[in-house]
Each structure stands twice: as structure tokens, then as C-alpha cells.
Image (spheres, rainbow, N blue to C red):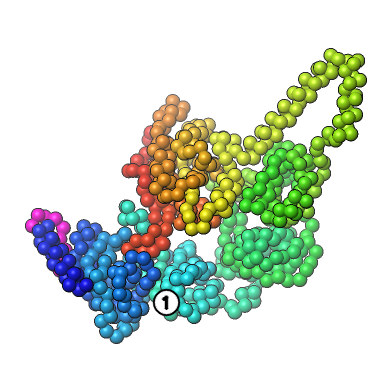
């Protein structure tokens, strides 16, 4: 092995000499003997496979890669360099091992790395270097690549598999993940809620094709690299209680604590999904994986981390502790007009509506109700099939129902941005607790067998006397029947389609996305998700008016729909944002081709108000399951990729997917698959 490495080094040196004579890049040192020299190479120099022979200390070691062991080393010059140890006989390395590295340089995915012919122990263990205190913003600005740093934050969650552990760390500037190789006996879950200081090496998340940094994570060597500055309380439920109203009000100290303890009576419990509680008149719904079954009216203590969801306060990573039984709070009776006042979010309410449709997605039943000019869904969580058949047989289209459940409003994000910063409900749904929350007030059809017989007899008698009148009556009945059917079809269409573009709405896409996740074979990719945002929409809307903006959105929607397959779902999820669910795509390249086609087909100017206006979109692509295993993470990651495309000028698509490479593992990649960006000044064009 050593002989082959030296031969490769000699050949590299000869090549470098020839390149120097021709004016091409050359290796600045032969061999390279320090980590600082490696880190100083540019892309062309690192591509020359310059020989490397150095001694350094291992600061991070991951033996679980398929193409070799991932080793990060540093020496007295201070840079931390990634080394890919070759397959074959591997040394029993660990953080602190003093090693000799022989290999050649490689440009890596973002910064220079070493592809090693051999990594062997060269002496006794040595201490790890002193770390430099940094902030999340410094890491995101790429100021610390190649450094050994320490970062302070609060551990929000811990996720692990057989090989690795990932901590979610909350800081004053946002969240970051910190990864390490799983260590037997280490109590990682015990860190949740603790304020910690983690020492490690920043590992950039990159767009490999463009060699651009799109994110960052922290690789830390072992459990000893985590210093607990303020431990979580042994019993998190011993934290002081906060009222629900205090979570929603202004405070000079800030609206949120790192971890909060609340208490209230249960108004709705979907175990492992959503828990809604009420403290006096103040309601709150939280996200929880706790599958403890609770009862309406029961007291419960909840501990979690403050967050925002749809412009509402909530808790995430919530732990529950049931209390005593109590009397459920009574529901508030509201009308559909009152529902849009914004006063009832999270409250237990009663509302009437006429049933115009039903659907079952992922074992959840959705009743589509209409009242006046409004249509809204009532969602019932999964119940056994037999119980559903027995208790819901009376739920017939056309029935007038009284439903009781928790009000969940959706906020118009565009209205908040345009207005005074106040949230406004644009749609809502009712979250039901059980089939007993649905009461049939009026059951169609009126036509029973007995009534039909009486009516037929009456028609015969009337027909003998007033034949012409009967014919006219039949015509009117037929017209009224057609009118009723058209009305029902219109209600169904309004509930499932966007009024401006005719595309599916957010709820329809989410239902189909969750169905696709449930139907996906374990371990096999089967679909992708596109997040699409119209570039520079606001200048057009502000300059030419809302009518022109609406026409621009209609044209964009038509071009997007024409760019995908008939089996794909295209939805407008709000404002100038669209999403596309690509089913039956088994390879990422298939999804990339469709996404590229969307970018290309949309990118053509249109004529508005007699002016030629440019039109293009930014597309984010995520692939199941690499880009997420649930609807929320898939949509979030597609959104992240879309904003990455938009931040680089738009008119392009970027991919968010885990990928193994010499530079990092489980990287999120936003790849430009649409060709060069064309940044167009809409105001100038207008």
C-alpha cells in the first residue's frame, strides 16, 4: 500500500512539473506536510492529486461509510481536514489518536480533502485542540470552515439509529443539528432541555455541482465533547407553570422561554399527533409524539419548546403527564361568519353545515360541509372500520349536521404581509374527537318507500285531471334537480380547487401526499415534491395592479400544469406559491427532468396591460424518502430548496436530498438543474 502511494506521489510530481512548464496549475508543495497547506489549495491545485504525508491528531472518526472511514484530523497548524481512509484493513482509530496519513489531495464537495492510501497510528494519543467559541450566524456565513469550534445552545430533540446520533440544538439565532457516532452507555436523551456547549468541526451542506454552501451542521467527536452548562431539571414538570395566555402576549423579556410548562383541560386528543387543551378561556394546541390516551376534560401537564405554527403559538417535542379527571369545557356555538373573526382558534366549538361530500385519507375521515357561501371540512381521526360503518351510516350527502370539535384556522400569509401585520383567517377546519361529535339534524332523502307510493298515486290522479299541468311540473322538477346537482358540484369544486387558477388547494395536496407516504414501499423511493414560487411577482402586482397579477398567476398555473404529467397533482398553496406531487418516479433523475421542464416551460414573457412582462419560477425539489418521511418535513425541505433557488437569482430548480460524498454524510443538496439563471428586472421591463 505504501509503495503504491509513493508511486502515485511520484507520478503526481512528474505531472505537476509538466504542467508548470506549460503554465497550468501545479502542486505548491511536494509532498504536502501540514493541514494548513491542504486547506490553502484552490480547486485546480487540489484536483492534481498532490502527494500528502503528514502527522496529525484525529478529532472525529466515523467507520460506517461504505467507501471507507471518514476521519477528520488536525495538526499544530490548526486546520481540520477531512480524510477518506481507504477500504481494507482499518486501524482502531478514535478521537485523540495520533496518526500518520499518506495519500493525495482531492477537491472534495466544497473544500480540499485527502483521499488516503493509508492511515496508521504513529504514537500515543494526544489531546484534542482548544476550541474557539462561535455563533450560528458565523457558521452559516462560512467563516469557520476547517476550524475546531464550540457552540452554545439548548438541546431540543435527540434522534438516533444503530450507528449515529443527531442532536437538534436551539440557539438564539436558530436551530442546527449536531451529529456524532453512537457511543455505548452515553445518555443522549438525558441532554434534552439542557443548555450545553458542544465542541466539534463545522461540516458544510453544499450544492456539489456548484460547490456552494447551502447550510451547515456540527460534527462532534463523542459524548465527552458535550459540556452541560445548565442541566435540564430531573423532573421537567417541576418547572414553573405558565398560563396559556402568557404564551401569546408581548413581554420585554421575549415571548418564549427555552422550555415551558403548561397545564389545562383536554379538549381534543389525537394520540401521537395533536393535543388541544384549555386553561379557562385560553386554548392551545401542541404537537406531541406521546401516544398516551387522554379524555376530554382530563387535566394534563405538558412540557415542550415554544414554536410558531401557521402564525399561532404552539409547543413542539412535547412531553405529557396526565392528571385528574374533570368536566369537559362546554363548546361555543358559532356561525360560519363568526368563524372568520379569528377569535376561536383552538377553541372547542359547535357549527352547523350541510354535508356535500366525504373522503377517507390515511384512515382519517373528512366531511365536507357547506353553510351559506362557505365550505369547510370536519376531520375525524382514524377509528376501526367496523365502528365507522356502524356510527356513520346516517352521514348521507345532503344531511344537515351539527359538528363539535376544535377550531383550526388557516391564516392568509399574504394579507399579513400587505396589511398591518395582523393575522386573518382565510379558511378553517373542525378537528373532531369521535363519531359522537357529529349529530344529524336533518336526514335526506325525503323520499321513503311509503311516501313514494303516496306521491305516485297523487301524481296519477292529478295527471288524469291536469295532464298539461303535470308536464309543466315535471319540467320544473327536472330544472330544480339539475340546479341542486350543479350547486353541490360547485361546492365540491370550491372546496377542492383554487378559485383563481382552478388548481387543487393545499388540503387536497396534503391528503394525496400523506396517502403517497402511506402507500410507499419501505426503503423504496416512489415520488417527489416540487415547491414552486413565481419570481418577482410583487413588482408586477404593485405596478400593474391585482388584475394583472391574477392573470400572471393564471398563466403560470397553466404552464406548470402543462409541464407535468396527467397523473401528477398541481396545487396552489397560497399567494404566488404552487406545489406539485410527482407520483411513480423511482429515480431522482426522473423528477429532475420534470422540474427542469417546469422551469423551462414557464420561463417565457407574457403580455399584460400592453407591456411585455418576464415570467419565471424558482423550484425546490425533494425526493421521498431522502428528503423526508412525513408530509411536514417533505414540504419544509422542498420549501428550503426553493428559497435556495430564489436566493441565487431564480429561474432555476434546486434539489434537497441526502447524499453521501467525501465531504460529508447525509448532506442536503440544492442542485441547479435548469441551466444558467436569468435575473430579470421586472420593473425595468415594465
Task: Give the image location of residue 553, x and y in percent.
Answer: 50, 36
- Identified at 36% across, 41% down, the residue is 679
Residue farthest toward the bottom in the current orientation of the protein: 124
Task: Give the image location of residue 158, x and y in percent.
Answer: 51, 69
Can the viewer see residue 229? no
- Seen in the picture, residue 504 relative to 196 is either above or below; the reply is above
Residue 78: within the magenta?
no
- Identified at 42% across, 72% down, the residue is 181
Label 1 crowd (10 A; few <14 / some 14-19 / many >=20):
many
Q: Describe residue 155's horizontal placement relative to residue 440 as left or right.
A: left
Q: Nearer the viewer, residue 578 or 113?
A: 113
The residue indicated by pointer 1 is 222
Quadrant where the C terminus sits is top left
Q: How many marks?
A: 1
Which region shows up in magenta? 21-31
Residue farthest toward the top in the current orientation of the protein: 468
Task: Give the image location of residue 373, x and y in percent.
Answer: 70, 36
- Identified at 53% across, 68% down, the residue is 157
- Seen in the picture, residue 141 relative to 606 is either above or below; the reply is below
Task: Give the image location of residue 595, x and y in percent.
Answer: 42, 43
Can the viewer see residue 497? yes
- Identified at 58% across, 63% down, the residue is 316
Amino acid at each position: 500500500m505504501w509503495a503504491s502511494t509513493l508511486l502515485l506521489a511520484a507520478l503526481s510530481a512528474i505531472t505537476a512539473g509538466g504542467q508548470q512548464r506549460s503554465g497550468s496549475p501545479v502542486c505548491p508543495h511536494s509532498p504536502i506536510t501540514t493541514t494548513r497547506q491542504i486547506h490553502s489549495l484552490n480547486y485546480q491545485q487540489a484536483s492534481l492529486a498532490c502527494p500528502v504525508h503528514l502527522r496529525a491528531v484525529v478529532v472525529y472518526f466515523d467507520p460506517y461509510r461504505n467507501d471507507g472511514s471518514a476521519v477528520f484530523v488536525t495538526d499544530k497548524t490548526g486546520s481540520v481536514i477531512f480524510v477518506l481512509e481507504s477500504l481494507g484493513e482499518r486501524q482502531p482509530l478514535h478521537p485523540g489518536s495520533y496518526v500518520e496519513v499518506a495519500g493525495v489531495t482531492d477537491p472534495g464537495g466544497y473544500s480540499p480533502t485527502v483521499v488516503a492510501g493509508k492511515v496508521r497510528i504513529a504514537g500515543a494519543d494526544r489531546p484534542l485542540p482548544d476550541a474557539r467559541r462561535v455563533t450560528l450566524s458565523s457558521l452559516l456565513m462560512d467563516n469557520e470552515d476547517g476550524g475546531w469550534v464550540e457552540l452554545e445552545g439548548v438541546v431540543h430533540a435527540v434522534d438516533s439509529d444503530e450507528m449515529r446520533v443527531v442532536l437538534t440544538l436551539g440557539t438564539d439565532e436558530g436551530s442546527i443539528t449536531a451529529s456524532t457516532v453512537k457511543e455505548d452507555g452515553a445518555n443522549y436523551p438525558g441532554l434534552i432541555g439542557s443548555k450545553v456547549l458542544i465542541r466539534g468541526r463545522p461540516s458544510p451542506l453544499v450544492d456539489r455541482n456548484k460547490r456552494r454552501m447551502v447550510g451547515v451542521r456540527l460534527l462532534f467527536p463523542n459524548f465527552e465533547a458535550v459540556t452541560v452548562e445548565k442541566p435540564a431539571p430531573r423532573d421537567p414538570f417541576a418547572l414553573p407553570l405558565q398560563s396559556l395566555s402568557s404564551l401569546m402576549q408581548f413581554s420585554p423579556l421575549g415571548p418564549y422561554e427555552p422550555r415551558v410548562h403548561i397545564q389545562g383541560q383536554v379538549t381534543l386528543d389525537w394520540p401521537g399527533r395533536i393535543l388541544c387543551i384549555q386553561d379557562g378561556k385560553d386554548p392551545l394546541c401542541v404537537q406531541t409524539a406521546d401516544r398516551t390516551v387522554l379524555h376530554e376534560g382530563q387535566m394534563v401537564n405538558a412540557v415542550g419548546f415554544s414554536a410558531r405554527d401557521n402564525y399561532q403559538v404552539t409547543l413542539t417535542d412535547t412531553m405529557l403527564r396526565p392528571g385528574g379527571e374533570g368536566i369537559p369545557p362546554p363548546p361555543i356555538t358559532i356561525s360560519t361568519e363568526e368563524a372568520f373573526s379569528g377569535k376561536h382558534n383552538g377553541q372547542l366549538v359547535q357549527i352547523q353545515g350541510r354535508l356535500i361530500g366525504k373522503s377517507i385519507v390515511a384512515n382519517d375521515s373528512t366531511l365536507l360541509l357547506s353553510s351559506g357561501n362557505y365550505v369547510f371540512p370536519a376531520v375525524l381521526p382514524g377509528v376501526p372500520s367496523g365502528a365507522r360503518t356502524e356510527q356513520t351510516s346516517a352521514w348521507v350527502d345532503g344531511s344537515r349536521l351539527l359538528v363539535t370539535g376544535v377550531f383550526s384556522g388557516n391564516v392568509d400569509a399574504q394579507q399579513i404581509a400587505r396589511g398591518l401585520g395582523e393575522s386573518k383567517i382565510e379558511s378553517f377546519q373542525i378537528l373532531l374527537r369521535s363519531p359522537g361529535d357529529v349529530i344529524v339534524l336533518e336526514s335526506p332523502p325525503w323520499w321513503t318507500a311509503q311516501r313514494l307510493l303516496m306521491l305516485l298515486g297523487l301524481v296519477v290522479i292529478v295527471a288524469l285531471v291536469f295532464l298539461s299541468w303535470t308536464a309543466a311540473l315535471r319540467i320544473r322538477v327536472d330544472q330544480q334537480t339539475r340546479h341542486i346537482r350543479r350547486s353541490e358540484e360547485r361546492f365540491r369544486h370550491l372546496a377542492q380547487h383554487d378559485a383563481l387558477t382552478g388548481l387543487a388547494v393545499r388540503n387536497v395536496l396534503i391528503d394525496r401526499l400523506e396517502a403517497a407516504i402511506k402507500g410507499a414501499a419501505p426503503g423504496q423511493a416512489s415520488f417527489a415534491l416540487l415547491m414552486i414560487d413565481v419570481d418577482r411577482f410583487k413588482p408586477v402586482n404593485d405596478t400593474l395592479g391585482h388584475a394583472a397579477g391574477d392573470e400572471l398567476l393564471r398563466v403560470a398555473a397553466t404552464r406548470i400544469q402543462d409541464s407535468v404529467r396527467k397523473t401528477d397533482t398541481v396545487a396552489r398553496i397560497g399567494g404566488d406559491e404552487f406545489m406539485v406531487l410527482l407520483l411513480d418516479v423511482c429515480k431522482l433523475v426522473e423528477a429532475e427532468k420534470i422540474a427542469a421542464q417546469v422551469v423551462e416551460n414557464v420561463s417565457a414573457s407574457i403580455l399584460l396591460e400592453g407591456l411585455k412582462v418576464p415570467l419565471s419560477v424558482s423550484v425546490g425539489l425533494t425526493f421521498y424518502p431522502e428528503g423526508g418521511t412525513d408530509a411536514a418535513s417533505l414540504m419544509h425541505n422542498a420549501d428550503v430548496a426553493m428559497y435556495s433557488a430564489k436566493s441565487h437569482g431564480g429561474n432555476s430548480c434546486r434539489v434537497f436530498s441526502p447524499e453521501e460524498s467525501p465531504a460529508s454524510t447525509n448532506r442536503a443538496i440544492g442542485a441547479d438543474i435548469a441551466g444558467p439563471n436569468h435575473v430579470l428586472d421586472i420593473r425595468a421591463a415594465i
